[in-house]
Each structure stands twice: as structure tokens, then as C-alpha cells.
Image: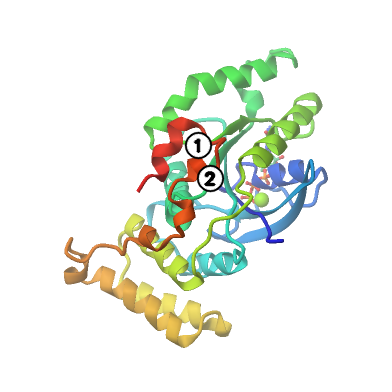
Amino acid sequence: MSARNVILFGEAGVGKSSVVNMLLGEQRAQTSTSARGCTFESVPYDVDLGEGVSVRVYDTAGLDESSAGAVIPENAVANLYDLLRRMKDGISLLVFVTRLGRITKRNQKNYRLFFEGVCQSRVPIVLVVTHGENACDDDADADDIGEGMDRWWDDNNQHFQSNGMTFHGHAVIVAKKCYQKEYEKSREKVRYLVRSTHLPNPWKMDELEWFLASIKYIFSLFKGWTKSHIQMLRQTLSTDGRMVESDTKIVVDEIVAEMDPPAACTSNPITPVRNRLDPQYTNLSEFFPSINKQFTHLFKD
Ligand SMILES: Nc1nc2c(ncn2[C@@H]2O[C@H](COP(=O)(O)OP(=O)(O)OP(=O)(O)O)[C@@H](O)[C@H]2O)c(=O)[nH]1
Ligand SMILES: [Mg+2]
């Protein structure tokens, strides 16, 4: 049976590893405030969600402060390639982790990078908001926390939508064990969320085409690439035989074509990758009936 891969991503320090540990039911992923991964760097964990469902969750670094506004570093591109190679069985779900607070530009860019870029808007995406205890006043009773978290979502979900971020499910949670009661409830919420929204038949593309489609999308999100970036990218991709020379050439040539003025004009747009998708995924809502109707437009061609 193929692995059901779940990519859990978000900015540094938002609580990704805490959510992984919550899903695992044990402290296996290292939580910290200092370890900063480079974008797309990922660590896999096999998670038993109960009811006979198991998934492989990839704890994946999103954009950090330095790469959010500038050119994405070349090693992020290499990490992306490594991640996609691990996705031979496809992707079943994206879990976007953020902490309760303001929606930042970086949030938006991360969302687009993973949902639109890596998954071509073809995989369900759910939102997990950590630090839910902050939805209440400091003097709130422990019993009020759950109510405060629900209220926070009611008050704020519109902001996500108006920033172009729609989700197929959400959970506002507390991922710190010292809030014992809320932690246990949150664990059930997150397990249910992943169990009920992931695709049993994952979505995937041919490895090289997938990498190219993702990289072109990323390229369109991050302006400012120069020939020297491309040179470094070429080196990174061919280091340790990561990518065969002929494929590296294809990738580099396609990116250079995007950069050159004649290729950048509208007469030569980014290849419409959706045309190459398996027809079974053209209407995800049929294939995946529990998707909320309001999101089905995301999957129309
Ligand atoms: N109060 C509170 N703290 C939390 C919550 N979730 C995570 N934390 C804390 O936030 C800090 C960072 O959590 P991590 O799980 O390491 O975050 P991360 O996203 O994996 O961080 P990086 O791997 O460095 O990107 C840790 O000290 C956690 O204990 C929460 O819901 N409430
Ligand atoms: Mg972590």
C-alpha cells in the first residue's frame, strides 16, 4: 500500500514539531526556539491516527525571515527536490501551522508556496493555529480556553479568506503540555482533522515535471533571481549526484528561459501544468466528498 504523505509546514517557531509530537503521542520531534531549518527541509514521522489510519507526516520548514522578502536560497530549492523525491507515492494533505496572531505576508507566501506551488492547488490544505490559550484573557478559567479558541476562529477566519488563504478544515489548539486539559482536547481535534481530510489516494506528478512546475511557481513568487543564483542552483542540484546532469540542464534551461525578456513576456507563459494532471483529480470534490463546498472553486480548471 502506498504511503499517505502529509506535509506539515509553517514559519520557524510556530509549533510545527509540537504538533507532530501531539499527533505521535510522544516527544519525538525536537521542539526548540533556536533550531531553524532552511525552507523545505523536512523530517518524516510515521503517525498512527487511530481507526486503522496511518500517515507519514513531514515536519517541514517554511520560509524564514531572511528568505521571505528576498530571493529564496538555492539550498531551499535543493531541499524541495529532496522532498519531492520522498513523495513518490504522492501527497495526501498539507497542514499549515501558524500561531495565533496577525496574518503576515510571510504566512501568505508560505501558503502559496506549498499549496499553489508544490501542490498545484490539487491537495487539501488544513490550518492548525497554535497558542490557542492566548485567545483568552490571562485570568480566564481553564474551562474558558476552549470557548475562547472557538470565538477567535469565528472572529478571524474572514481575515484568512480575505488574504487569499482558504482551508478545507481548521483547528485552533494548545500544543504545550502544561495546559494539560486543553492539550488532550487539542490532540483529538488535530488527529480527527488529519484523519478526516487527507486523500486516501494521494495526488502526484512525474518527478521532474513536478519539480519544474514547483520551481517555476516559486520563481514567479520570488523576483530578483540573477544569473549567479542560477549558477549556484546548478551546482547545488548536481552536488553529490542529487540530480542527473541531463535533468539539471533541463531545469536550468527552463529557469533561464523564464528570466530572459522574450520568454518572460505573455506569449510564452509558464507551462500550464494542470493539463498534465491525472483526470481523476480534475474535480477533487467528487473524489473527496467531505471537502467543504465553498472551497470547490479552488479545484476547477
Ligand atoms: N504557550 C504555547 N507554547 C507553544 C504552543 N505550541 C508550541 N509552543 C512552544 O513554542 C516553542 C516552539 O515550538 P516548536 O514546536 O519547536 O516550533 P517549530 O515550528 O517546530 O520550530 P522550528 O523547528 O524552530 O521552526 C516551543 O517552546 C513550544 O513549547 C502553544 O500552543 N502554546
Ligand atoms: Mg521544529
**Residue under the image location 52 percent in, 69 percent down:** 81
Foreground residue among 195 and 35 = 195
Query: Is residue 255 visible in the rendered structure shown here?
Result: yes
- Within 10 Å of disc 1 (Cα), the crowding (few <14, some 14-19, many 20+) is many
Q: In this view, does 17 lie above or below 270?
A: above
Q: Residue 131's spot in the image, x, y percent?
A: 64, 31
Q: Residue 19's spot in the image, x, y percent?
A: 69, 42
- Within 10 Å of disc 2 (Cα), the crowding (few <14, some 14-19, many 20+) is some
Q: Residue 20's spot in the image, x, y percent?
A: 71, 46
**Residue under the image location 56 percent in, 31 percent down:** 100
Going from the N terminus, do you reach mark 1 or mark 2 first?
1
Discs 1/2, front: 2
Q: What residue type is labelled 2?
A: Phe
Q: Residue 203's spot in the image, x, y percent?
A: 54, 56
Query: Is residue 66 visible in the rendered structure shown here?
Result: no
Q: Distance between the residues labelled 1 and 2?
A: 17 Å
Q: What element carries label 1?
A: loop
Q: In this view, does 216 lie above or below 298?
A: below
- Specify the label residue 167 is tagged with: 1
Q: Looking at mark 1, is its residue's CB closer than 8 Å to ligand 1?
A: no
Foreground residue among 284 and 37 = 284
